Image (cartoon, rainbow, N blue to C red):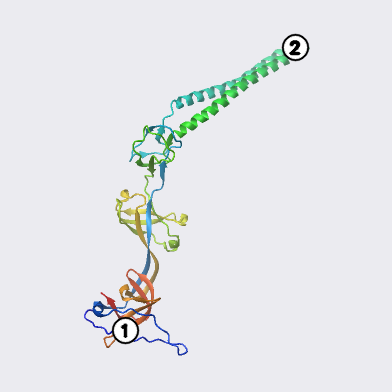
Amino acid sequence: MSGLVFSMGLFLLATGCEDKPQEAPPLVLESGDEAAEYSLTEVMRGTLEETVSIPCYYRKNEEQEVYFPVSGKQIRRICVQEGDIVKKGDLLAELAIGNIEDQIDELEYRIKRNELQLAYIDEDEKLDEESRYYSLVYMSKRSEEDVEDYDKQLQVSRDRNEQRRNSYRDSIEFDKKKLSALQTQLAQSRVYAQFDGKVSSVEKGLIGTTSNIEKCIMTVVDDQEGYFEAQKEDMVPYLTAESYSMKVMFGNGRGDYELVPRDRDKWSDKQYFSILKGDNTEGLEVDDKGDITVVTARKENALYLPNECIRNAGDKNYVYVVTEEGLRDVVWVTVGLHSDGVTEIVDGLDEGDKVIRRG
C-alpha cells in the first residue's frame, strides 16, 4: 500500500519446550523507500491447478540417411533432387560399374540353359534305357552274350551321361558363383528408397567423384504427417487428458497446435502425440520444439495468495500483515499447491485477510 510507513520493530513470539526458547529463522526486512512500494492483497478462495510444462519435439515417422556401401568407386548418377517425392524401391543413386548388367544377363541365360540341358540328360537316359531294354526283351534269340553286351552298353551310357551331368553341374556352379559376385557388385553400386517419402537434402557435386562409405549423400524423410515426442516417463500417470494445447515458438512451423495422445500402449521412456490441428503443420521440421502443460494436482475451494506476497526464511514461509497500530508484523504460513503465479495457503490465514504485496 503506497504511502504506508512501517516501523522496523518486529516482535517474534516463540513457543518453547521445557522452558527453552526456540529461535525463529532470521528475516530480511525491507526498510526506508522500499517500504513504500508495498500494497495490500486479500487472501482469496478458488480452484487451483498445479502444472508442469513438458517439452515436445517434432519427429518424422522415418528418416533414411543414404550412403554408398562401398568406397573407391566413381559416382555415375544421382537420380533425384532435393524436394523430389520417391516411392519405396526407387533408385536414388548409382556407381559406375561397366557392363556388369550385361554380364549378369548372359550368366542368368547360361545357367538356365545348362539346367535345362541337365534335365534333358535325365530324360534322354530314361528313353535310351527303355529302348535298349525292349530291344533285348523282344529279341527272337537272346544269348548270354547279348545280355552281357546289354549290361556293358548300359553302363557305358550311364557313365557317359554322368560325365555330361558333372560337366553341366560344374558349369552351373561356377556361373552361379560368378553371378552372385556380380549381383553383389551391382547391389553395392546402387542405393534405393526404403520407404515412400521426400528427398530433404542432396549433397552437391557428387557425379564423377569417388564414393565413401562414411559420407551421407542424401536424406529421405517420410512425407506422411509426423508427430511430437516427449521424454517424461515420470509424467505418464498425469497424461490422461484427451487433448493438449501446444505452442511452437520458432521456425517455419511456429504457431498453435492441438495434440492427441498416440499409441499409449507403446509409451515407456518416450510418449507420442499426433497433431489434431495446427497453424503451420507443413512448415514443421524435425526437432522443432513445443511445450504442453500437464495438470499434476488440482484442488477445489482452496485459499491462495499471489506468489509476490509469500516470503521464505530457510525452509519456512511467512507473510507480512499490518497490525491495528499500523505496524508491519509476520504471520507464518503453510503453503501447498503452486498454480500459475499463485500459491495455496494451507494454514495461517483466513479468506479475506489482508497481507502486504510488493508492487
Amino acid carrying mark 2 in the image: Asp
Instruction: Identify the image quadrant of residue 295.
Output: bottom left
For the point 48% across and 31% down, the residue is 185
Reading the image, the residue beneath label 1 is 329
Rendered location of residue 81, percent (x, y): 34, 37
Q: Is residue 190 above or below residue 282?
A: above
Q: Quadrant of the N terminus?
A: bottom left
Q: State the separation of the CA atoms marked 2 and 1.
A: 136 Å
For the point 23% across and 78% down, the residue is 33
Looking at the image, the residue that sits furthest to the right is 144
Instruction: Identify the image quadrant of residue 160.
Output: top right
Q: Is residue 110 above or below residue 60?
A: above
Reading the image, the residue beneath label 2 is 146
Q: Is residue 321 left or right of residue 107?
A: left
Rendered location of residue 332, percent (x, y): 37, 81
- For mark 2, does the 10 Å Cα neighbourhood hold few (<14), some (14 to 19), or many (20 or more) residues? few
Q: Quadrant of the C terminus?
A: bottom left
Circle 2 sits in a helix, a strand or a loop, which is it?
Answer: helix
Task: Looking at the image, tell me whether mark 2 or mark 1 is earlier in sequence order.
Answer: 2
- For mark 1, does the 10 Å Cα neighbourhood hold few (<14), some (14 to 19), or many (20 or more) residues? some
Judging depth in this view, the residue of 26 and 244 nearest the camera is 26
Judged by depth in the image, the label closer to the viewer, 2 or 1, is 1
Amino acid carrying mark 1 in the image: Asp
Rendered location of residue 272, percent (x, y): 41, 55
Instruction: Identify the image quadrant of residue 210.
Output: top left
